[in-house]
Structures are given as structure tokens and as C-alpha cells.
Image (cartoon, coloured by chain):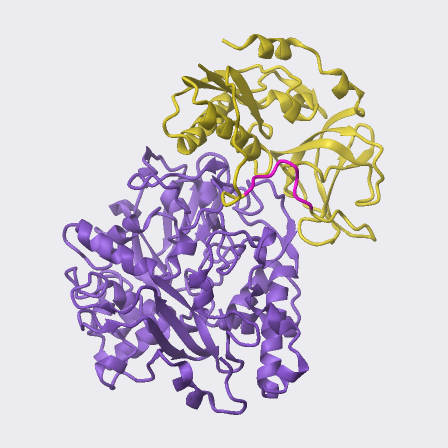
């Protein structure tokens, strides 16, 4: 059973803060790589919303495109200048790699610098760095981590950070048991003329990979896995106000 | 220590003091012989130096000399006369150079246990007295590795492979017939032996997660410690205990199991070893004028640090970027130029970016994107060592078409993914060695090979898991072909010089 707080969160519309951010866009497109060079990881990813004719800079996604495949773009428009890559910036943004093949295409830098890489805020510190102790009091609490469309891969410098935050808290809190619930957005939605729906089984895949990681990190933990399909949007903060991202999640609930 | 200018290197070597310098050929007395035969009972000194084409390789044994008489690493504990040391020779950076194997064949007429039919020949079914039957070992330093097929279990969980494996070509006969090949329940691939040294780095865990697999690291069932995933080419052994059990059974043909005492002694010895090039023919001693080459730095540093947020990879040679004029005057022009080249090579290694494309484990599924711009140090990221802080299973294409070079003498397999296609090769593709997929049973892991150790390269050509690079230049040339990097000739030479001093 979910905590009351979480249940309310799931039922609530997106928060005012999220609603005040830019226009939400969601489309499927073949990504274009712009070979901007400001050092490592500095290249640009662009994607065209074919319905509107707009080209967006989607480089800030924590999981980036594959130029061989279509991507599902979900993001919010911003007032950020287009100077890094030459197109309006979506931020926050997600780019889920789909199975649909694309003609790979690379643009030259054309004078655009890209972005010099900086560590994202959600990055793991090495084990050699002393951790700040997690302090109580401890009570029922739910953590969430998020996934690419129809995948169960725990994304580097995004979901692994969220998982690690949960694990560190669980290690200190020592709950009686942990319920890991995998969600899948199985309700079909039409995006760019395509009917998109996650596979029901990806909910179990997400729960299983998360539970296995928790088991490896905290072998003594008692873990139960569950699944929910037809996931609905939530305003969980680490989904960054993107409804689609919030649906594709795992919840880790500590019970005492 | 500084070599006197213009002093021939050969004369300067005795100045190494405690070093047990070994220059002898096979005809010399056993104590000077670079070849360590099983059971000969030499004492392994605390400092052991051997010359190679690029200079001198040094192996340090922490804790002092080790009498090897009766030691399970050095004794022929199996049934074929080999010991661990047979294929992990100190003169070859604790690996085995193909040239050493060839010299051993000439010296012994092929009767050394090194050439045991089980894996020192192209296939046990071939006539063992013929040189051609051992061509892969003699020419490319490759040993036959027989893996069970289909794989049924990994990390304690049952596995059903999501791909089929068919033999397209079997030039050696070890992937067909009644005893060998997928139809007989096994697959034979051919690989270089990995060095048995610097293990504290290869076992180091810098982070608790494997970003390439999207999961926390597994734990060793014996110790409870997390496993680095950096020991073997296909990551089939997560700990040194698993590795030595695998090697004892397959390579030494040990009937039965290693005893706990034997395991403990092998582990103790292996964990005390640090190996690196100590002297360069072209540049002189590698720990002078502020440089920190050689194995002492390896011995004295903490392993597992990510170079990008700490000590930059190969910054051991940063002091040679700007050698003061007064110091430069003490070097010959050739030594000075070489040292400057090494320092440039380290910078090229770290800073020369290029587009990495279609490489599983890098471009998918981690989230970096395909392509991603980065440099050599993207994967070779551990300070002091240059291996991957994370488990290093990536596909550079060295074993898989179309990127791999043509090798008519290697078996070729056709892989058909039964579920999702491989992210870059598609549903059907061809490989000489499925690598990590032989361990996990996953099509997406085909072609992935654990990053090689970069220390001691000067003593153990050829390179890459299947020996495709015959020399250090061959490594650079492969990367240039694979990723169209655009290295200048100077940059290529700088990288070669850097690798020659690691």
C-alpha cells in the first residue's frame, strides 16, 4: 500500500512550478548530430518536430540519441540562447532511443561551439570520497528512479545517482522490508503519428534490475517486487516536470 | 637516478643497484635465463629487470624475495608440465610475447609444455609435432580458450542465450567434429594471455555501479567484496580465485582443484607484483627529471582513482612537458626529444578527441549517445594504470566484422540475435570471438572485450585480445582505421613512445 503522501502526489496534477516552465513538446524524430567541438562530450544533438517544423537542441538529455535510430523527444522550451548548437534549447529534455531505423546524419560545427562538458548535478561520487552520514529519524519513505522509453536500463549519471541516494538512505534506515514497484506506461498515445506504448513486461524488468542492484548493494535487505502498468504522470521532482518521464519509473518504498 | 649523458645504456644498467639484471639468452645458466621453467626453484627477487626492444621492464615484488621452490605459481601442479609462470613470464611483463613463444619453439623443438595440445596448439586434433599446428601461438601469441556453449549460468543465475552461434569457417578444426564446436557443447576462441601483475588496480572498485550494464557491481561470494569486472577478456571470472581455478583446470590440466593453501599462496604472490617499464632505450631512466615512470609509483599509489577528477592518466610524465634548460643540457638530443615526445603522447592520449561511433559499451546503452566525442582516456581512465575504473567490457570491433581485420586462420562465427538486434551490428553478424557474450549469453554483448592492461606493453607484443596489432604502432593504426581520428604522424609517434614507457 502506498503512503498517503505518495498517493496524493500520484493523483495530483503537475505542480504549479512545473506548469510554469516552458511549453511542453513531445515528438518522434530522427536525430541529427552536430560535430561541435569544445572538448569531450561537447557535440550537439538536434531533433526536428516535423509537425511544427521546429528544430530543437536536445543535447541536455541525460540519455542521448543514437544517430542510427529515431528518438522520442520530450522536453520544455526555454529562453536559453541558441548559441551553443544553433537551435532553440529544450531543458529539461529526454531523448529515448526507439527501434525505428534512421539515416544517420552529421552536420559540421558551422561555427557553433557546443557545450563544454560539466559534471551533471546527478553524478556519483567515487567510493573513495567520504559520504556524509544519513541521519534519521527514519520512517516510511519512497524513492523513485526513471527510465528511457520502453527500457529498463539504469542510466549513468541520472538513475544510478537516484538509486544510490536511495541505497544510502536504506543502509542507514534499515527498514523491515523494501517494496520495489516497476511502472510501465502501457496506455497507447499517438506521438508524431505513431502509436507509442511501453511493453507491459518492462515494468517487471525495471523492478527486477532495481531489486538486483539493491540486493548487491545491501545484501541483507528484504526486497519484494511489484509491477504496475498504465502508469500515470506524477510530479516527482527528479522527473524534472516531464510527464512522460515521470510515468517510466521505479518506486522504492521502505516499510518499517 | 640520472644516466650519465652519452653513457651507453648497456653500461649504465649496473647502476640499478639491487636490480637483478638479466641479459642472458636461453643458453646461459638458469639464474640468468629470461625464461622461467616450471619447477626450477629460482628465487624471485624483490626487483627483477629484463631488457626488451624498448628498454628495461621492471617487476617489483613487495615484501622481499620469494623462493619459488614448491610454490604453486611456479610448480607444474597440473598434468601437462606447465606452471602459471609458463604463460606469465617476468621478462614479458608477466604475460607472454609471441616472439618468446617462437624462440621457445626453436630452442626446444616444440617440446616445451608451453605448446601443450590443450591450448598451446591451434587444436588438439592437429599433429602436435608440426610447427603449423601451433601457428596461432607462435605468430600471434594466441592460446585456445574453450568456453561452454550454450552458456547456462552467470553470476549465480540461469542464462538462456538470446542468440544463436553458427560456425562459418573452422580453419583449425576446433569448432567442428565430435568433440569440438557448438554442436559438441563448446566454442573455441583464441586470445592473448593477460598480464599477472598490478592486480590491485585491476581489482579496484572506484564506484559501486557498472554504468555499461546499468546495475550495481556483483559481490564475490567468498569475500563479500564487490568485483571490478576487469580481470579477464570475457569477464568470466570475477575474482582471482575464480580466475586461478579456471586457469588451473584449462591451461594446466589440473585434475581436481587447487587447495586453499595453494590458492592463498598464488594470491599472495600475485598481489605483491607491480610491473612497468623502468628504462627506455631512447629516453633513459623513466623516473628522472621529475617523471614518475616505473613500477614504484604503481606500488605506492592508491588504486581505483578516476583520472578525470583526480590525478590525470599518464601525468607521471607531465614533468617532461617543460624540462628546464639546465636539465635538458644533461641529456643527449635524442633523449630530450624522446622525453618531450612521451609527454606530448600523454597529452594526446588525454586531450585529442574524436568521434567514437557504433561501439557497444560506449555508445549504447550507457546514455553517452552515438556518436560521442571523447579521447583515449574516456575508457582508459584509471590514474596510474589506464584501465577502466568501471568494468571495462566494450566493443572496439577488434574481433567482429566489419571492423576486425581479416584473419583466415581464425574461426568465424555467425551470430543471429533471437530477440532485439544488436544495437550496432543488426540481427545477423560475424565475429571471430563473441567475447563477453560467451559469458552473459546476450547478443548485445557480442564483440565486447574487457579493456587491456596498459602497463608493461613494451615487453609483450602483440596487442589486443586476438593479437591483431603486431607492435605498438599497430595499436594506434587500428584506432585510426576504426574511428578516423586524424592523428598526425607526430601524434602517432608520440603515442607509440608513450606506450613504450608504460
Using the image as rendered, state which of residue B42 and residue A203 is in the foreground: B42
Q: Is residue A155 left or right of residue B443?
A: right
Using the image as rendered, state which of residue A196 and residue A237 is in the foreground: A237
Residue at 23% from the left image edge and 57% from the top image edge: B265
**With respect to residue B21, does A23 lie above or below?**
above
Q: Find chain B in the image and tell me its colour.
A: purple
Q: Is residue B398 left or right of residue B226?
A: right
Residue at 32% from the left image edge and 62% from the top image edge: B143
**With respect to residue B356, does A65 lie above or below?**
above
Is residue A123 inside the magenta stretch? yes
* Camera sees residue A145: yes
Residue at 36% from the left image edge and 41% from the top image edge: B225
Q: Which chain is yellow?
A: A
What is the magenta segment's predominant secondary structure? loop
Q: Quadrant of residue B79?
A: bottom left
Residues in magenta? Answer: A118-125
Q: Is residue B167 left or right of residue B347?
A: left
Give coordinates of residue B489: x percent, y percent: 64, 74
Using the image as rendered, state which of residue A208 and residue B265 is in the foreground: B265
Is residue A97 inside the magenta stretch? no
Give coordinates of residue A56: x percent, y percent: 78, 36
Q: Is residue A124 left or right of residue B201?
A: right
**With respect to residue B218, does B14 lie above or below?**
below
Give coordinates of residue B463: x percent, y percent: 44, 66
Residue at 14% from the left image edge and 50% from the top image edge: B256
Give coordinates of residue A135: x percent, y percent: 53, 25
Amino acid at each position: 500500500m502506498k503512503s498517503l503522501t505518495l498517493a496524493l502526489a500520484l493523483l495530483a496534477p503537475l505542480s504549479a512550478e512545473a506548469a510554469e516552465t516552458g511549453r511542453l513538446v513531445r515528438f518522434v524524430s530522427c536525430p541529427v548530430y552536430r560535430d561541435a567541438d569544445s572538448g569531450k562530450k561537447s557535440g550537439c544533438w538536434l531533433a526536428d518536430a516535423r509537425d511544427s517544423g521546429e528544430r530543437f537542441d536536445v543535447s541536455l538529455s541525460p540519455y542521448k540519441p543514437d544517430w542510427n535510430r529515431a528518438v522520442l523527444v520530450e522536453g520544455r522550451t526555454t529562453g536559453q540562447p541558441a548559441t551553443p548548437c544553433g537551435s532553440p534549447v529544450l531543458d529539461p529534455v529526454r531523448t529515448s532511443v526507439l527501434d525505428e531505423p534512421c539515416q544517420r546524419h552529421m552536420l559540421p560545427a558551422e561555427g557553433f561551439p557546443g557545450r563544454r562538458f560539466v559534471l551533471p548535478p546527478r553524478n556519483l561520487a567515487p567510493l573513495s570520497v567520504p559520504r556524509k552520514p544519513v541521519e534519521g529519524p527514519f520512517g516510511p519513505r519512497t524513492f523513485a528512479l526513471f527510465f528511457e522509453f520502453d527500457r529498463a536500463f539504469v542510466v549513468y549519471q541520472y538513475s544510478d545517482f537516484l538509486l544510490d541516494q536511495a541505497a544510502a538512505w536504506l543502509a542507514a534506515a534499515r527498514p523491515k522490508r523494501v517494496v520495489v514497484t516497476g511502472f510501465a506506461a502501457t496506455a497507447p498515445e499517438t506521438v508524431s503519428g505513431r502509436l507509442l506504448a511501453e511493453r507491459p513486461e518492462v515494468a517487471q524488468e525495471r523492478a527486477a534490475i532495481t531489486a538486483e542492484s539493491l540486493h548487491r548493494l545491501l545484501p541483507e535487505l528484504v526486497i519484494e517486487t511489484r509491477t504496475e502498468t498504465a502508469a500515470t504522470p506524477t510530479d516527482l521532482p527528479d522527473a524534472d516536470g516531464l510527464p512522460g518521464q515521470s510515468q517510466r519509473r521505479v518506486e522504492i518504498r521502505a516499510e518499517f | 637516478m640520472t644516466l650519465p649523458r652519452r653513457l651507453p645504456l648497456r653500461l649504465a644498467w649496473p647502476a640499478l643497484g639491487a636490480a637483478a639484471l638479466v641479459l642472458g639468452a636461453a643458453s646461459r645458466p638458469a639464474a640468468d635465463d629470461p625464461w622461467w621453467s616450471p619447477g626450477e626453484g629460482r628465487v624471485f627477487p624483490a626487483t627483477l629487470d629484463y631488457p626488451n626492444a624498448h628498454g628495461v621492464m621492471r617487476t617489483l615484488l613487495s615484501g622481499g624475495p620469494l623462493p619459488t621452490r614448491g610454490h604453486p605459481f611456479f610448480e607444474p601442479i597440473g598434468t601437462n608440465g606447465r606452471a602459471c609462470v609458463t604463460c606469465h613470464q617476468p621478462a614479458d611483463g608477466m604475460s607472454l610475447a609471441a616472439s618468446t613463444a617462437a624462440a621457445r619453439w626453436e630452442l626446444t623443438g616444440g617440446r616445451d609444455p608451453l605448446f601443450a595440445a590443450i591450448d598451446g596448439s591451434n587444436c588438439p586434433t592437429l599433429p602436435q609435432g608440426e610447427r603449423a599446428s601451433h601457428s596461432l601461438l607462435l605468430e600471434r601469441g594466441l592460446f585456445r580458450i574453450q568456453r561452454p556453449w550454450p552458456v547456462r549460468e552467470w553470476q549465480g543465475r540461469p542464462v538462456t542465450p538470446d542468440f544463436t552461434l553458427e560456425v562459418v569457417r573452422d580453419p583449425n578444426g576446433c569448432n567442428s567434429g565430435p568433440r569440438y564446436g557448438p554442436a559438441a557443447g563448446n566454442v573455441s576462441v583464441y586470445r592473448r594471455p593477460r598480464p599477472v601483475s598490478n592486480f590491485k588496480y585491476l581489482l579496484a572498485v572506484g564506484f559501486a555501479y557498472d554504468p555499461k550494464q546499468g546495475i550495481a557491481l556483483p559481490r564475490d561470494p567468498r569475500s563479500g567484496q564487490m568485483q571490478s569486472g576487469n580481470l579477464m577478456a570475457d569477464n568470466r571470472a570475477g575474482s582471482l580465485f575464480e580466475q586461478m581455478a579456471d586457469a588451473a583446470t584449462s591451461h594446466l590440466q589440473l585434475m581436481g582443484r587447487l587447495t586453499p593453501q595453494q590458492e592463498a599462496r598464488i594470491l599472495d604472490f600475485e598481489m605483491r607484483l607491480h610491473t612497468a617499464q623502468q628504462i627506455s632505450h631512447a629516453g633513459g631512466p623513466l623516473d628522472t627529471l621529475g617523471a614518475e615512470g616505473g613500477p614504484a609509483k604503481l606500488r605506492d599509489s592508491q588504486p581505483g582513482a578516476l583520472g578525470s577528477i583526480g590525478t590525470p592518466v599518464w601525468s607521471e610524465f607531465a614533468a617532461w612537458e617543460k624540462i628546464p634548460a639546465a636539465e635538458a643540457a644533461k641529456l643527449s638530443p635524442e633523449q630530450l626529444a624522446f622525453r618531450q615526445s612521451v609527454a606530448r603522447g600523454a597529452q594526446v592520449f588525454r586531450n585529442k578527441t574524436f568521434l567514437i561511433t557504433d561501439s557497444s559499451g560506449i555508445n549504447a546503452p550507457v546514455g553517452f549517445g552515438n556518436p560521442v566525442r571523447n579521447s583515449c582516456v574516456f575508457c582508459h581512465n584509471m590514474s596510474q594504470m589506464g584501465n577502466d575504473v568501471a568494468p571495462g567490457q566494450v566493443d572496439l570491433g577488434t574481433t567482429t566484422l566489419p571492423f576486425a581485420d581479416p584473419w583466415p586462420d581464425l574461426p568465424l562465427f555467425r551470430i543471429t540475435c533471437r530477440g532485439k538486434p544488436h544495437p550496432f551490428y543488426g540481427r545477423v553478424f560475424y565475429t571471430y570471438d563473441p567475447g563477453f557474450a560467451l559469458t552473459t549469453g546476450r547478443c548485445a554483448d557480442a564483440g565486447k572485450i574487457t579493456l587491456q592492461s596498459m602497463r608493461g606493453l613494451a615487453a609483450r607484443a602483440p596487442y589486443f585480445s586476438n593479437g591483431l596489432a603486431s607492435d605498438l604502432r599497430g595499436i594506434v593504426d587500428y584506432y585510426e582505421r576504426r574511428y578516423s581520428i586524424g592523428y598526425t604522424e607526430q601524434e602517432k609517434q608520440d603515442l607509440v613512445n608513450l606506450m613504450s614507457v608504460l
